[in-house]
Amino acid sequence: MEIVLVRHGESDGNANGLCQGHSPGYLTTKGVSQATSLSTTLFSKGDYDGIYCSDLTRVTQTLQASMVTTTSIIDSVIYDSLLREKNAGIFEGKKRELMQNARTKSGLNERLYQPQDGESWQQLQDRVKLFYGKIKEKFDGNSHCRLLVYTSGGIHFK
């Protein structure tokens, strides 16, 4: 199984150094340009057996901008909240340094620190494993399948 991961383009939150987490966020002009430039590269090796996308606005905007030459397949995209960025809890919409300072003060390593009302990196990876389990089950036995997955930073498959 080949999984091609696409991280969303630059968002307003990225440009302003904010924790975005599960907030929608919107692509900047630069982010739209980044996504548009992916169009020919993403489809140069042929079609995909499945296309999945986080339901966050900045990610769906990346998908739409990267499919300017292949808009007919947008209707077949499967949107999944399991692909969302790490929930930053009380730090969403606030400067990243505030969460980094709170983590340092807690004495926990970055993987285990969980902000109030948010999730730790470990919890994020557990959520991603649930998504991977779903697609593995769906495409079981098809070792040659190609999947395109639009998501946020911090999401990866091992």
Image: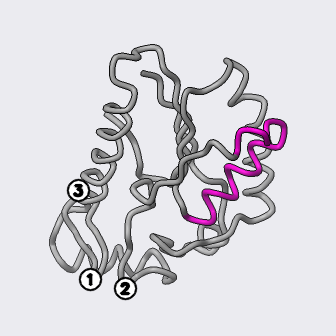
Q: Residue placed at 73% from the left, 47% from the top? A: 35
Pointer 3 residue: 122
Q: Is residue 117 magenta?
A: no
Q: Which residue is mark 1?
A: 116
Circle 2: element type: helix
- Amino acid type, residue under disc 1 in the picture: Gln
- Residue 55, position in %: x, y? 54, 61
- Rendered position, 115 above or below 30: below
Q: How is the image coloured?
A: one colour
- Quadrant assignment, res 14: bottom right
Based on the displayed image, in which of its 4 quarters is residue 97 positioned?
bottom left
Separation of residues labelled 1 and 2 (CA atoms): 6 Å
Pointer 1 or 2: first along the chain: 2
Which quadrant holds residue 28? bottom right
In the structure shown, which secondary structural element does the residue marked by tag 1 occupy? loop
- Mark-to-mark CA distance, 3 and 2: 18 Å
Q: Earlier in the sequence, mark 3 or mark 2?
A: 2
Residue situated in front as seen by the camera: 115 or 100: 115
- Taking depth in this image into account, of 118 and 60 the one nearest to the observer is 60
Amino acid carrying label 2: it is: Ile
- Residue receiving disc 2: 90
Which segment did they paint magenta? 56-74
Circle 1 crowding by C-alpha within 10 Å: few under 14, some 14–19, many from 20:
few
Residue at horizontal 74 percent and vertical 48 percent from the top: 34
Q: Is residue 145 left or right of residue 113?
A: right
Chief secondary structure of the magenta span? Answer: helix
User: Which corner quadrant holds the C terminus?
Assistant: top left
Of the 4 image quadrants, the one containing the N terminus is top left
In the image, is residue 74 above or below residue 39?
below
